Image (cartoon, rainbow, N blue to C red):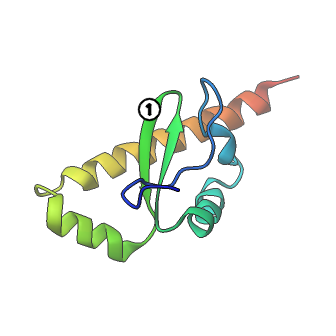
Amino acid sequence: MTDKNTVPQPPTRPIVGNIGELDSAAPIQSMMKLAKTYGPIYKLTIFGKDMYVVSSQELVNELSERYDPPGTYAAIGFVLLVSVLIFLALDRIERWLRP
């Protein structure tokens, strides 16, 4: 039985965690699929770092109103988004450069 206060998470693999759950060709669709399976808030672990995903604007607004000193979560979200985009871009460049 799972604790109702535990954030759901896909099974992890050693070292890489949940990186295999994200399709580099369609990362947003991958995250939407995970939200359908695990609910509107779920946890991913990638290379030992925990990341909590909130998949609806309503929940983001509610969390921001309750816990966000002006702009903190928005800034963190922006940095995370840029990091994911850089990761995906590097992956595509690496594939393109392969002989």
Along the horizontal axis of the image, is 26 left or right of 62?
right
Along the horizontal axis of the image, is 47 left or right of 53?
right
Residue beneath disc 1: 49
To which quarter of the image does residue 19 belong?
A: top right
Check disc 1 and report its element: helix, strand or loop. strand
Residue 14 vertical placement versus 57 (above, below): above
x%, y% of residue 54? 41, 61
Dot 1, how many residues are within 10 Å of its Cα: few (below 14), some (14-19), or many (20+)? few
Q: Quick one: which residue is furthest to the left in this view?
A: 69
Q: Quick one: which residue is furthest to the front in this view?
A: 1
Q: Nearest the camera: 9 or 74?
A: 9
Residue pictured at 82% horizontal, 24% vertical: 98
x%, y% of residue 7? 43, 54
x%, y% of residue 20? 69, 40
To which quarter of the image does residue 88 belong?
A: top right
Residue pictured at 38% horizontal, 73% vertical: 57
x%, y% of residue 87? 56, 36
Q: Quick one: which residue is furthest to the right in this view?
A: 99
Residue pictured at 62% horizontal, 53% vertical: 27
Q: Quick one: which residue is furthest to the bottom in this view?
A: 58
